Amino acid sequence: ANMPRPPFAMAPGKRFGASMVLAYAFVQVGQCFMSVGPAGMRFFPMSTSDARLFGSSMTTPTLRGRSGALSCRSSMLEQVRERKMKEVEELKANMPEDAAKILEKGATNKNRYLKAVKKPKGTISVVPQIKTKAPTLGSFASLPAVDVLSAHCYEAGAAAIAVCTDKEFYGTDWESLKKAAGQQARYKGKFPGPLPVMAYDFFIDEAQLALAASYGCDAVCLNAALLGTSTKDMVASADRMGMDALVEVHNKAELDIAIEAGAKMVGISNRDMDTFQLKHPVDYQLRTWSVPVEETVFGLVKEVPEGVHVTAMGGCNETLVAWTLRDEGYSSIMVGEAIIRGSEMRMASSAYSAAYNEAKGLIMAFKAKGSKKYGP
């Protein structure tokens, strides 16, 4: 009853043979985890990233009919890869001069981002993620003044800023990053100094890294699910171009890839990279996860070797969630949607409150040494 509809349509007056229907059914069952419990037998779709743990034979095969190939499933991540390959071709054909120079000669890495997010044990640093869209939500906010939000992040005590530069998925782009970084440059000579800026994108080639460096980025986020064994080369390339690399992982296999790549920072993301949906959504009324996350969010952080900085990514939009993550061993959290929505609240609630109170208040609350038992 829960079997998804086949991803192919039948033409009027046409019928697929029983063998093709059965083949599709077996493919779907093969792409599921089975769980038996008090509620009976349940099936959960297996993502491509999870399937890799069982070998390439577990990935979705392609069905073929009389008219040719019928693809059962194409993950969002694979679509991203194809799109980025085209973008890289265009970038290399029209490489900006500054980026070409960095690609050739490199730059000195001062580890500004890594130094900024490191905090003493028992505390947590906050990295606001600037975006206006999400793959699973679409457009969720407007952001007319990126530089103003950048200033608010500085005033609230954020450790760094991550700016999404994939406009199709996140609504913000390299121009947004330029504005955010430009605002931070105004704090040179002050204490604290400018916040480090990270480019959050789907990096698959060092030409993209050179472009990020040319915009003055201090760090980049590298997705282990997208890069696989190429992660090591990309971490080395980022360092050669003067940037820290945060390697985003989603399971133990990807964490192993990140560690073998020599990553000094890992970000554990609570997302299924085939669909970009949160694996374990947070119940904001109960202020807890709606399903157990011992094997992902809490379990993986315990697998991170000492000396590697670890950031929680995905669904960290509530104060008690941030405090729970801190107490479980996370050193940083990357927060997007909640802060962006808060920055939209420009109407002051009283004569004594600032129009950007919500965004600043969230950042300060996440950092507070509060108790998850008694609440904020």
Image (cartoon, rainbow, N blue to C red):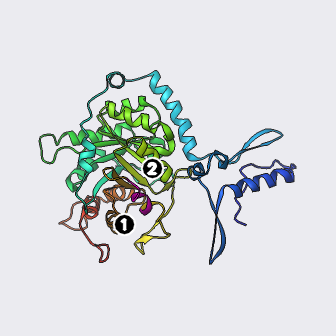
> What residue do we see at 20% from left, 39% from top?
185
- Whether residue 193 sits left or right of residue 83 in the image: it is left
> What residue do we see at 43% from left, 58% from top?
300
Q: Secondary structure at mark 1?
A: helix
Which label sits on residue 321? 1
Q: Which residues are magenta?
A: 298-304
**Magenta stretch: residue 343 in it?**
no
Which label sits on residue 174? none
* Neighbours of disc 1 within 10 Å: few (<14), some (14-19), many (20+): many
Q: CA distance from mark 1 to mark 2?
A: 22 Å
The N terminus lies in quadrant:
bottom right
Residue 39: percent from the left, percent from the top? 63, 76
Mark nearer the N terminus (1 vs 2): 2
* Neighbours of disc 2 within 10 Å: few (<14), some (14-19), many (20+): many
Residue 159: percent from the left, percent from the top? 25, 51
Of the residues tagged 1 and 2, which is closer to the observer? 2
Q: Please say if the residues under marks 1 and 2 sit with CB atoms less than 8 Å apart.
A: no
User: Three-letter amino acid code at disc 2?
Assistant: Leu
Judging depth in this view, the residue of 9 and 372 nearest the camera is 372
The C terminus lies in quadrant:
bottom left
Residue 105: percent from the left, percent from the top? 32, 22
Using the rendered image of the protein, determine whether residue 335 is visible from the camera's viewpoint. Answer: no
- Whether residue 319 sits left or right of residue 295 in the image: it is left
Residue 186: percent from the left, percent from the top? 18, 40
Residue for badge 2? 255
Task: Please say if 277 is above or below 183.
Answer: below
Q: Quadrant of residue 328?
A: bottom left
User: Three-letter amino acid code at disc 1?
Assistant: Val
Q: Quadrant of residue 36?
A: bottom right
Task: Please say if 86 is above or below 75.
Answer: above
